[in-house]
Amino acid sequence: MSDLEARLRALPAFPTPLPVLDPGAVPAEPDALFRDWLSAAIDSGERQPHAMAFATVRADGKPVPRTLILKDLDDAGYHFSTHRTSRKGVELAADPRCSMLFFWRESGRQVRVTGVAVALDDEISQRDWAGRPSYTGSPNPDWQRYALRPTEFEFMQAREDRQHTRVEYTRGDAGWAHAVVTTPAG
């Protein structure tokens, strides 16, 4: 065991007590559970509960994550924004598949939202641009607000025994279905 491995193993785990995720009591729609968990993170004082790792796919097929902020959630999907000519803008233009990963450390909760990004209209994009701290009063034609339209979710609730509870939602022709994701003991 290296010195680093020993230091990493000695780091504190999740705080206790942790919330419990009862797979039998989850809502039929994943947006409802996401909103509940995000609201709990906001109400608890979690720093930047709207921050997430956002992954796109490069032209060579490699995933590329970076940290972004969730701007909104509505019928269009999970909103985020960037310049069209940024790396992520170019990657989304070539392949709209993407994924968001939210992690709320203090509650041991994690949510992965995967789907495709859709560009929203210019009015929404420019309203978002005007709300940025660096806004100078001029529109930015390169600025784009997107919505990730989910096709699947994974909700993970940490447990002290590391046998974390996972519920996965997938969208099919008949709507959303969910199932418990089991992890082999070990």
Image (cartoon, rainbow, N blue to C red):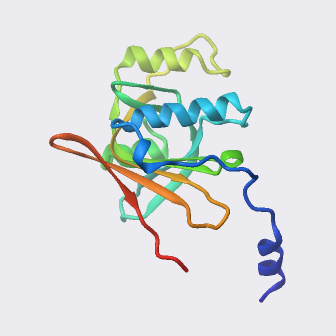
Residue at the extreme top: 137
Of all residues, the one furthest to the bottom in this rendering is: 1
Indicate the position of residue 95 as horizontal and vertical percent values.
31, 50
Left or right: residue 97 compared with residue 12 = left
Q: How many marks?
A: 0
Vertical order, 29 against 99 (above or below): above
User: Which is more toward the observer, 93 or 41?
Assistant: 41
Q: Quadrant of the C terminus?
A: bottom right
Residue 116 coordinates in the image, percent (x, y): 32, 43
**Residue 71 or 83: which is nearer the viewer?**
71
Q: Position of residue 23 (x, y in %)?
A: 43, 50
Q: Residue at x 39, y 57 (%)?
A: 180
User: Split into 4 quadrants, where in the image is the N terminus?
Assistant: bottom right
Q: Going by the picture, which residue comes out furthest to the left?
A: 173
Residue 26: quarter of image = top left
Q: Where is residue 149 shown, x and y percent of the image? A: 33, 37
Residue 148 as seen in the image, left or right of residue 80: left
* Res. 173 in view: yes
Residue at 63%, 46% in the rendered image: 19
Q: Answer left or right for 179 relative to 112.
A: left
One can see residue 82 in this view:
no
Q: Is residue 149 above or below residue 9?
A: above
Seen at 53% across and 32% down, the residue is: 36
